[in-house]
Image (cartoon, grey):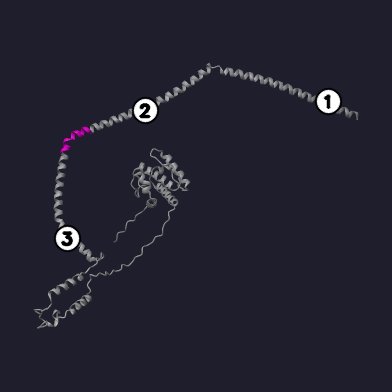
Amino acid sequence: MFRSEPRIIVDEDVETNTTNSFVYHAMMEDLLEKLKILNYEKEFLANLKMKPIHRYYYIIPKNPGEQFYLFSLMAAWLIRKSGRDIEQPQESHDPNDTISNILEQVKALGIKIECSPNKLKQGVGEDVVFLLNQLANIALEHTKLQWSPLVLPEEKEEEIEVIDDESEINLERVEEEMIAAYSDDSDDENLFHIGDINVNDRNTAPTQIQIDTDEDNWNLEVERVVPRLKITIRNDNRDWRSHLEQMKQYRSNIDHSMPLAKTQLERLYKEISSVLDKVGSREKYLNRELDTILEDYRQQLDKLSKVKEDYKRISGGVAERNRELAKLNDRLDTIKQQMEERGSSMTDGTPLVNIKKAVSKIKQEIVEMDVRIGVLDCVLLQSRIRDEKQVSNEFNTSAVF
């Protein structure tokens, strides 16, 4: 019977989180490529005297302070590369103000990002990678980079070069020159005749060959022909024979130098091992001798830590009491100021003078109002008398008719 394979059940949330992490890892690699195109190593990192970042720098949290500071500097640099002006972030600045300034410039550039400033304040994460990637895209568009089309190199077949060297052997030419040289001699004794060889049997070789040639002429001919017998062979790196020869040569060199190097290494190993043994023995001796001193040192360190804790606790109480004293002094100052104001107002007669002036002014206004009322009464009385006369005149005229 066959064993059934175990079924692996994967949670959908875990799968989506893994996919998102892979997506942001790929986005971080794209960000590094874009930064290299923008020449960030010379324009950005050279002023900070820092090493180039790796592809997991904004993904894995390691040093939040350094990562947030570098993120803010890089975001400001990309914003300036995009044509916007932003203040250079500093380590002493408030992180909230730095993030708000960056988000304002990002909104001005038209980037839509939905994340809380607290996530950007961490200096790592998916939102940081997304924001820097979008800023890098806008910076690339602003710099107006032109991508040249990809040109594939043409593969050319290697042609075998024929070396025309005068030192190569040309048999026909040698034969012609030898024939011409021998034909110039009037004496046929210098020629080598094959028919002069006595062969007694096919299976037996000639025991002696008689050559009637001048030795001086033969030496001259050899000296003339020898320079032309030089053969030049061009080395081909693709030939396996040359590689085999190199391997043999390397092997022979290794075999030749191996015994000497082995003896030297063995002697060096013995010296190092002896030195290590001496160092180990001395270390053990020092540990034995300094054991009591180290124990006293540990006890003193414990006492020092306790004293520091007591000092912190006492200093904390003193600081709290100083704050309370400052609050009480402020309250006392306010009460003194109020008492001084009340005392000055009680002894000062300016309010009474002001009241008298106001009463006299009111009386004068009342007199003026009485005069105006009298004038209005007179005008009203005259208008009534005039109306009554007019009415009586009209009545009399009607009675006459």
Mark 3 residue element: helix
Q: Position of residue 160 (x, y in %)?
A: 29, 69
What residue sits 69% from the left and 22% below the top? 369
Q: Position of residue 355 (x, y in %)?
A: 60, 19
Task: Specify whether residue 6 is painted magenta.
Answer: no
What residue sits 64% from the left and 20% below the top? 361
Q: CA distance from mark 3 to mark 1?
A: 158 Å
Which segment is the magenta one?
285-297
| Image depth: mark 3 or mark 1 in front | 3
Q: Earlier in the sequence, mark 1 or mark 2?
A: 2
Mark 1 residue element: helix
Q: Which residue is mark 2?
A: 319
The amino acid marked with disc number 3 is Ser
Pointers 1 and 2 in contact (C-beta within 8 Å): no
Eyeballing the image, is 179 above or below 166? below
Mark 2 residue element: helix
The amino acid marked with disc number 2 is Ala
Q: Earlier in the sequence, mark 3 or mark 1?
A: 3
Of residues 377 and 264, which is closer to you in this image? Answer: 264
Q: Which residue is mark 3?
A: 252
Q: CA distance from mark 1 to mark 2?
A: 98 Å
What residue sits 14% from the left and 47% below the top? 271
Judge the density around disc 3: few (<14), some (14-19), many (≥20) Cα neighbours within 10 Å.
Answer: few
The amino acid marked with disc number 1 is Lys
Q: Position of residue 119 (x, y in %)?
A: 41, 44
The answer, for residue 42, to whether it is visible in the render is yes
Q: CA distance from mark 3 to mark 2?
A: 82 Å
- The quarter of the picture where the N terminus appears is bottom left
How many numbered marks are there?
3
